[in-house]
């Protein structure tokens, strides 16, 4: 990061506001009689710094996500998050390759240049159906005909896609190297901007990095439009309401930062524990933390 | 009715699925950083023994199965049922052929077995991990032949057939691992 001129920053872990993302569950903390939240990533305050200083920044921080526990998940984990001003997500992927190559060299690990796979091509080729024609019912049918279990009840299209990727797509990746999945469906944009791809479909300018089938990082060509941000927050809050999820306090500072002017930038968050898992060939996240959640 | 949420899932938990009691064998938490969470489990049907995959949406609730493992003493077989007694309460229960499965091949009177009860009725019986049985019938032994590593079938007093080393004789008592059905050693 020093070599690339990226400045280290430190932002609060405890905040008066939380992410509205319906898939993320913030820990609630009572502080001086007020409800506060532990951050699920340092994204919001880092974006406030970006708006104020228009400069490349990074941070290594503990982050907290409730209801996430398994051999690849611990409710507290370590995140390396950084933002590069003036870059788009493709340039950010280029710079990540340089960084990861250096890390691998340090560990004497064999390096293969990561492949970049377009989300819809990947899904379409595995299921044998073009993405725009795909439905939850078709995905379910694929599970049934492959003798794999598909959950009962109301499953959204995006949730069905998530399970499809995990069950059928990730196992096809070479297990000894990195793969980027790029251009997610626009409905999964989160805080990435959206674009029209060369086939004319709306996609999120977003990527995820996998090593084998282990998710390592998640990056965006960042959304900077304050109005679109407010719409997405509203839509998140509606989904939270419909699903009887906690109505969290919205981060008005983040909206103000976007209104003041976020620079054109790309940002990415790396799960440091996951990176350690792959470097040490650990089978469980418990092997790379001093004390896992049950013993914390 | 008691129920479990997916975040309480762990190996050994007993749940009701499709009207049958199941035991969770494996539970994997699946969640992309920015996506929906699932629990992908492998569950064993406690009636049939079959293991299948079942995936649940995170947060879903599943009915608990009233299944309990309890240690009971085997008493006798009346030709149709195998009778067991709880050594603490002296309560007696009869298990049928389906519940016994292969366990009857290893049962000696007074053996302490693990009986799985579903709604109070025997669902499955696990014999002790190791039993000592007398050989009722086997081909004549090859005295001194302890090196060739060959084996031969031996019929036990309970009806089981176990592969034993060539030097073992009729009437000898041997120790057997009931989980694999394999010979362990001679019992002096």
Image (cartoon, grey):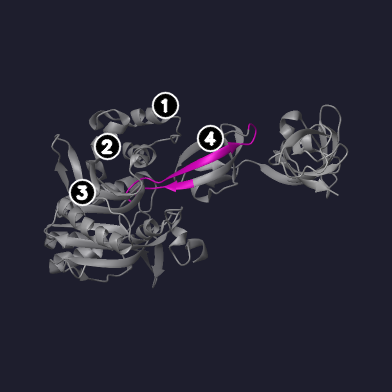
Instruction: Give the residue pinned by disc 4.
Output: B52
The reply to whether label 2 and label 4 mark residues of one chain is no
Residue A231 tag number: 3
Instruction: Give the residue pinned by disc 1.
Output: A145
Give the letter of the chain under mark 3. A
The reply to whether label 3 and label 2 mark residues of one chain is yes
Give the letter of the chain under mark 1. A
Q: Position of residue B108 (x, y in %)?
A: 84, 39
The numbered mark, 1 or 2, whose residue comes first in the sequence reads 2
The residue under the point 23% across, 65% down is A46
Q: Give the range drawn in magenta.
A: B28-48
Q: Position of residue A58 (x, y in %)?
A: 23, 66
Q: Magenta segment: does it hold B39?
A: yes
Report how far apart the C-alphas of labels 4 and 1 lie in the structure.
15 Å
Residue A122 tag number: 2
Report how far apart the C-alphas of labels 2 and 4 lie in the structure.
28 Å
Which corner quadrant of the image does residue A289 belong to? bottom left
């Amino acid at each position: 990061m020093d070599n690339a001129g990226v400045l280290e920053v430190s932002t609060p872990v405890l905040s008066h506001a939380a992410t509205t993302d319906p898939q993320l569950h913030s820990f609630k903390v009572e502080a001086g009689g007020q409800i506060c939240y532990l951050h699920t990533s340092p994204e919001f305050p880092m974006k406030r710094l970006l708006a104020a200083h228009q400069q490349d920044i990074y941070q290594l921080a503990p982050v907290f996500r409730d209801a996430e526990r398994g051999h690849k998940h611990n409710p507290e984990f370590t995140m390396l998050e950084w933002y590069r001003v003036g870059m788009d997500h493709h340039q950010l992927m280029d710079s990540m390759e340089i960084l990861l190559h250096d890390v691998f060299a340090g560990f004497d690990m064999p390096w293969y240049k990561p492949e970049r796979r377009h989300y819809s091509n990947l899904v379409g080729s595995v299921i044998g159906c073009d993405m725009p024609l795909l439905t939850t019912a078709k995905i379910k049918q694929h599970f049934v005909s492959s003798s794999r279990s598909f959950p009962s009840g109301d499953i959204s299209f995006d949730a069905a896609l998530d399970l499809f990727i995990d069950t059928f797509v990730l196992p096809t990746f070479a297990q000894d190297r990195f793969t980027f999945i790029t251009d997610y469906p626009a409905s999964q944009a989160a805080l990435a901007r959206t674009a029209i791809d060369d086939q004319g479909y709306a996609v999120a300018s977003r990527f995820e990095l996998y090593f084998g089938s282990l998710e390592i990082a998640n990056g965006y060509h960042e959304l900077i439009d304050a109005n679109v941000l407010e719409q997405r927050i509203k839509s998140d809050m509606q989904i939270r309401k419909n699903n009887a999820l906690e109505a969290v306090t919205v981060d008005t500072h983040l909206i103000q930062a976007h209104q003041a002017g976020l620079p054109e930038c790309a940002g990415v968050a790396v799960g440091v524990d996951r990176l350690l898992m792959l470097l040490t060939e650990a089978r469980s996240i418990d092997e790379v933390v001093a004390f896992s959640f049950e013993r914390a | 009715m008691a129920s479990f949420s997916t975040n309480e899932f762990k190996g050994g938990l007993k749940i009701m699925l499709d009207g049958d009691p199941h035991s969770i064998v494996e539970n994997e938490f699946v969640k992309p950083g920015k996506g929906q969470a699932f629990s992908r489990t492998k569950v064993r049907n406690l009636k049939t023994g079959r293991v299948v995959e079942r995936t649940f949406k995170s947060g879903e609730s599943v009915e608990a199965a009233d299944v309990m493992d309890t240690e009971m003493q085997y008493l006798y077989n009346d030709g149709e049922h195998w009778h067991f007694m709880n050594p603490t309460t002296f309560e007696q229960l009869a298990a049928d052929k389906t519940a016994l499965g292969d366990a009857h091949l290893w049962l000696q009177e007074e053996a302490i077995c693990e009986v799985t009860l579903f709604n109070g009725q025997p669902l499955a019986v696990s014999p002790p991990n190791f039993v000592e049985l007398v050989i009722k019938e086997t081909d004549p032994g090859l005295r001194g032949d302890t090196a060739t590593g060959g084996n031969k079938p031996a019929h036990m007093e309970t009806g089981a057939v176990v592969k034993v080393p060539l030097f073992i004789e009729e009437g000898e008592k041997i120790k057997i691992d009931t989980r694999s059905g394999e010979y362990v050693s001679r019992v002096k």
